[in-house]
Amino acid sequence: MKAPGAAPMSGLKALGIYIHIPFCLRKCLYCDFLSGPADLEVQERYVQALCREICEESGAYKGYQVETVFLGGGTPSLLKGEQIFRILETLYGSFHMAEVCEISMEMNPGTADWEKMTAFRKAGINRLSIGLQSACDEELKALGRIHNSDDFFHAYRMAGEAGFTNINVDLMTGIPGQTPESCRDTLWKVVNLVPSPVHISAYRLIVEEGTPFYENTPSLPGEEQERHLFEMTRDFLRQQGYQRYEISNYAKHGFACRHNQIYWRRGSYAGFGTGAASLIENRRFTNSRDLESYLNNERKRTDCQCLSLSEQMEEFMFLGLRMTEGISTRQFRENFGKTLDQAYPGIIDKFCGQGLLQRRISDKGEEWISLTSFGMDVSNYVMAEFLLQ
Ligand code: SF4
């Protein structure tokens, strides 16, 4: 798998940038992300406020080189090509950008058209993440998605014609009405796309508080059935040559998402836009979620905290263990001045004995600890042991 960006030039430190676009045509029934409908005027004011934030804050990042950019939401593809261009132009004018920078954008198939697709590509987007969820129209309807499967296939074809080669497709298991047959049908259609996607994310549907699904929960596949769907997805993708490199993420060789790896490896990242979170050298802060004040350039930060050593340790464990490569015991020792077994006496051995964790020695003779396949399925249980007491 590709490392999260080559080493930055001339002593600069690596940085990932997240840009939040909090607009969607309509809320999906399961969604608790910071997003909602907005008219064109609000969208334009937001883009202006975003560009202003990027310019004004960039001074704090002079010692960094941007290795990855991720435009997420919400629905970034709701914006016009020219607005995406302006955001990226502002980034390039304000930051030291790596020569080969991964620039990803989330796309809702219900917002795609040829003009936008070509404009996004021209603006510099080089990785698309298209949210399909399911190729079954009844399931999409049950989720409250704005698109149907034809919209997705049309968007995917246009993306290829516009020159995108690095494309992720988002899928979901545990959808109301989903069966092993419909799940297999979706998987089959996705891996047979031309060209086949180089990356697939397969998330489990979680009913979050505050969503319409929470208030009025539809009939969902039972726990056993849902586990079966998830495992079926995992096995199918492995057979099709996708390497699972994180609990919910699969990629063809060399196409793991570099941006997400920065999160899981606790690299530095800066977030711009409402609700966007940053982690810079163990300092965490989050932008206020309030859209109105953001539009008026009255930005506020919340949750500013310098992480203590034990908080860093906790994050190192539960983020690192999400990845199939796991964590390096050497790195742990160098970061925290003690061995893993000293920090968590008996726990690693206990989970290894239960078949949930495994130790392995790399080609370089380094010891790594990772979740087994079974451990990944019950990762919450394992991670809980590494949380602060
Ligand atoms: S498109 Fe994505 S962000 Fe928007 S409402 Fe649906 S799930 Fe939420």
Image (cartoon, grey):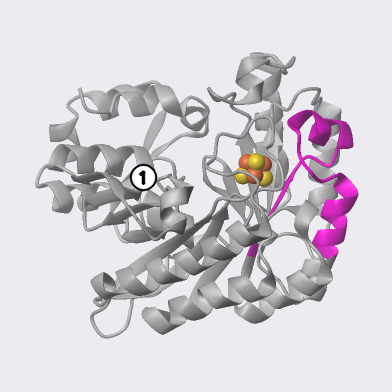
Quadrant in which the C terminus is drawn: top left
235 relative to 1 in the view: left or right: right
Pointer 1 residue: 320
The answer to whether residue 100 is visible is no
Q: SS class of the residue under badge 1?
A: helix
Please say whether residue 14 is one of the residues in the magenta stretch.
no
Q: Position of residue 90 (x, y in %)?
A: 46, 78
Q: Position of residue 84 (x, y in %)?
A: 60, 71
The answer to whether residue 156 is visible is yes
Q: Position of residue 366 (x, y in %)?
A: 28, 54
99 relative to 204 in the view: left or right: left
Residues 54 and 321: in front is 54
Residues 160 and 208: in front is 208
Q: Residue at coordinates 57% horizontally, 44% vertically from top-left?
A: 35
Please say whether residue 132 is one of the residues in the magenta stretch.
yes
Q: Residue at coordinates 61% horizontally, 72% vertically from top-left?
A: 83
Quadrant of ligand 1: it is top right
Q: Amino acid at mark 1?
A: Gly
Residues 256 and 75: in front is 75
> What span is colored magenta in the figure?
128-157
Measured along the vertical axis of the image, is residue 308 above or below residue 357?
below
Determine which quarter of the picture holds residue 116: bottom right
Local crowd size for mark 1, using a 10 Å CA cut-off: few (<14), some (14–19), many (≥20):
many
Measured along the vertical axis of the image, is residue 85 above or below residue 344?
below
Measured along the vertical axis of the image, is residue 65 above or below residue 110?
below
Determine which quarter of the picture holds residue 195: bottom right
View extreme (right): residue:
150
Q: Position of residue 232 (x, y in %)?
A: 71, 32
Residues 64 and 359: in front is 64
Q: Residue at coordinates 65% horizontally, 38% vertically from top-left?
A: 234
